[in-house]
Amino acid sequence: MAFVELKDLTKHFGQVKAVDGVNLEISAGEFLVLLGPSGSGKTTLMRLCAGLEQPTAGHLIINGQVVNDIPPREREIAMVFQSYALYPHKTVFKNIAFPLTVEKLAKKEIKKKVEWSADLLGIGHLLDRRPAQISGGEKQRVAIARALVRTPKVLLLDEPLSNLDAQVRHTARVELKKFQQEIGVTTIYVTHDQAEAMGLGDRIAVMKSGKIRQIGTPDDIYHHPVDIFVAGFIGIPPMNFVEQNGVIVGFRPEVFHPADPAHAENRISFRFRILRVENLGSNKLAYGTIGDANVIANLSVRMSIEEGKEYDFSVRKADVRYYDKEKGARIDSVRS
């Protein structure tokens, strides 16, 4: 395990600030997720950690040692790429063993390490097969096993589940979190998929334009987003935004319900015109408008509502977040 520090870490490609003065501390054994849209800088930040890119400025520190000038192989960091990069002509055993073979370890030691990592990831029965003979989820586990045999201090994962179908991806998330907790390796995981981030991360760092906009636990990020970007990026469906008295009022679709006059105190009411209802089986999504704003309500499938009609809906004041209209930053109170 390793304690990782990023101090004013910066990477410019010409005039483009891919990573712009990032400061971050990652605890030993932590599972940290870098989350953001394409072009946010998350993959560049990971490549800086791996030593595949040199920083324009700032420092990367592992267990108190600045590693900027240390070659990738000597950093005791392992990386798993989105493509897995398995050798098609080699067996699973030889794919996992490859980094140990390069280091010229004894065959007995290689066998021991390969079998250990394969058993950890539940692929011990696949060691004699070739990549073409195993599934996408199994290939992903082979790639992770290959990274683990080097006993890295830090494990870097660059969207390793994105090539899997939805059902396999969900299962892989569960397995990935379980083995990371078992082995306790400090892990940095890059994704644009918020479901992966929320399900895997001890903490999430949300990035945009090379900067970290917010870092916190999944609960913090979801319930207390610091600005409109984070609030709108996190959540399926995303947070609703309605302008009211010069301030942006934000609230989640699942807390937006038909108004109950008996419980009107400490609630904010809206007139909600429903345009479309989407039945998802376990729940239904009502799409509509409040004034000029498009909003969504996440409702019980048993709730009776009709398209084309208007209803009184409300939100508890405790569930409302307020944002500055110009800067987008969260504010603690509204103007009277």
Image (tube, rainbow, N blue to C red):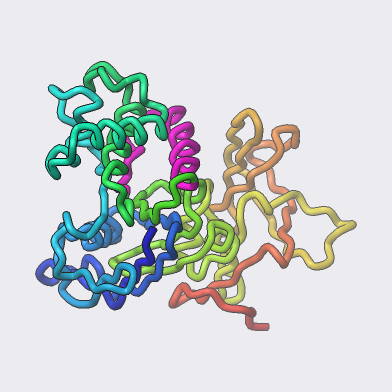
Q: Residue at x 86, y 57 (%)?
A: 261
Residue nearest the viewer, comparing 279 with 308: 279
For the C terminus, the image quarter is: bottom right
For the N terminus, the image quarter is: bottom left
Q: Position of residue 290 (x, y in %)?
A: 61, 56
In the displayed structure, would residue 169 be above or below residue 200?
above
Residue nearest the viewer, comparing 127 with 215: 127
Q: In terms of secondary structure, what is the magenta stretch mainly? A: helix
User: Is residue 163 inside the magenta stretch?
Assistant: yes
Residue placed farthest to the left in the image?
Answer: 14
In the image, is 215 to the left or to the right of 65? right
Residue placed farthest to the bottom in the image?
Answer: 336
Q: Is residue 96 visible?
A: no
Residue placed farthest to the right in the image?
Answer: 262
Q: Residue at x 42, y 57 (%)?
A: 32
Q: Is residue 65 visible?
A: yes
Q: Residue at x 24, y 26 (%)?
A: 93
Quadrant in which residue 206 is drawn:
bottom left
In the image, is 59 to the left or to the right of 141? left
Residue nearest the viewer, comparing 225 with 103: 103
In the image, is 207 to the left or to the right of 174? left
Q: Position of residue 273 (x, y in %)?
A: 64, 48
User: Is residue 106 inside the magenta stretch?
Assistant: no
Please provide the residue range marked out in magenta. 157-181
Q: Position of residue 219 (x, y in %)?
A: 58, 58
In the displayed structure, would residue 103 be above or below residue 110?
below
Across the whole image, how many numbered discs are drawn on residues?
A: 0
In the displayed structure, would residue 9 be above or below residue 123?
below
Q: Residue at x 41, y 55 (%)?
A: 33
Q: Position of residue 160 (x, y in %)?
A: 32, 41
Quadrant in which residue 326 is drawn:
bottom left
Residue nearest the viewer, comparing 162 with 116: 116
